[in-house]
Image (cartoon, helix red, strand yellow):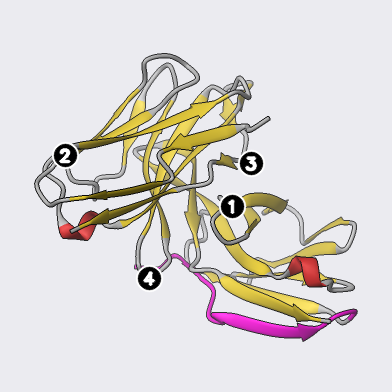
Amino acid sequence: DQQVKQNSPSLSVQEGRISILNCDYTNSMFDYFLWYKKYPAEGPTFLISISSIKDKNEDGRFTVFLNKSAKHLSLHIVPSQPGDSAVYFCAARGYYGGSQGNLIFGKGTKLSVKP
Amino acid sequence: DTAVSQTPKYLVTQMGNDKSIKCEQNLGHDTMYWYKQDSKKFLKIMFSYNNKELIINETVPNRFSPKSPDKAHLNLHINSLELGDSAVYFCASSQEEAGEIKNEQFFGPGTRLTVL
């Protein structure tokens, strides 16, 4: 049962262009969403997050948009750089055993930014 | 200076063996986690632990047990290893503030476990 879905396993973008990574979720109880970036042989690193009470959060080249009615969020990277090439995981804050804070991850989208 | 570290980075072992993976965080965080990334690349929570309680994902077999000798460490013990346990295991930590766990989690580099 995938509560967080990243339907595109990979994305290829030219340097300088916009990268748009998409994520869908099924659980309307999720109240916080995060994007993590992962390089090979390393652990995921936090990139940007958004609360469910907002529809946009921006941090430098990275912007996350949340459409609650569609249960959809997206990560925009502008302009894309070769160093952005990595796997991007969408995550939502879920609940296990009545305790908050546990993250539910999507499968990831591998972004390749070509020079 | 590594924030969350795990050892070993690679672990190859035979079915039926018992093994441990160590995790240490030097961030002063209250809560630590173990995740499993399987062959389908899903990152799934296995445990979360702070000094008050251990939350277990009910899908995790009881052959897996976390042990916390102190606040900075959460080690993962696995008994009677099975082929399906082969995966990458990530440790993570986060800070609880005002009774609420912060959303950002810091991950270790992962331990690739291969069971033969």
Above/below status of B22 relative to A80: above
Judge whether residue A70 can be spotted in this image.
no
Residues shaded magenta: A1-16
To the question of a shared chain for discs 1 and 3, the answer is no
Kind of residue at badge 2 = Asn
Q: Chain of mark 3?
A: B
Mark drawn on residue B62: 2
Cα–Cα span, label 4 and label 2:
22 Å
SS state under label 4: loop
Cα–Cα span, label 1 and label 3:
11 Å
Write the residue at 59% across / 81% down.
Answer: A10
Q: Chain of mark 2?
A: B
> Callout 4 environment at 10 Å: few (<14), some (14 to 19), or many (20+)?
few
SS state under label 3: loop
Are circles 2 and 1 on residues that touch, CB within 8 Å? no
Q: Chain of mark 4?
A: B
Kind of residue at badge 3 = Glu
Write the residue at 71% across / 70% down.
Answer: A85
Q: Residue A55: where, in percent of width, then height?
A: 77, 61
Above/below status of B21 relative to A33: above
Q: Earlier in the sequence, mark 2 or mark 3?
A: 2
Kind of residue at badge 4 = Lys
> Callout 1 environment at 10 Å: few (<14), some (14 to 19), or many (20+)?
many
Are circles 1 and 3 on residues that touch, CB within 8 Å? no
Q: Chain of mark 1?
A: A
To the question of a shared chain for discs 3 and 4, the answer is yes
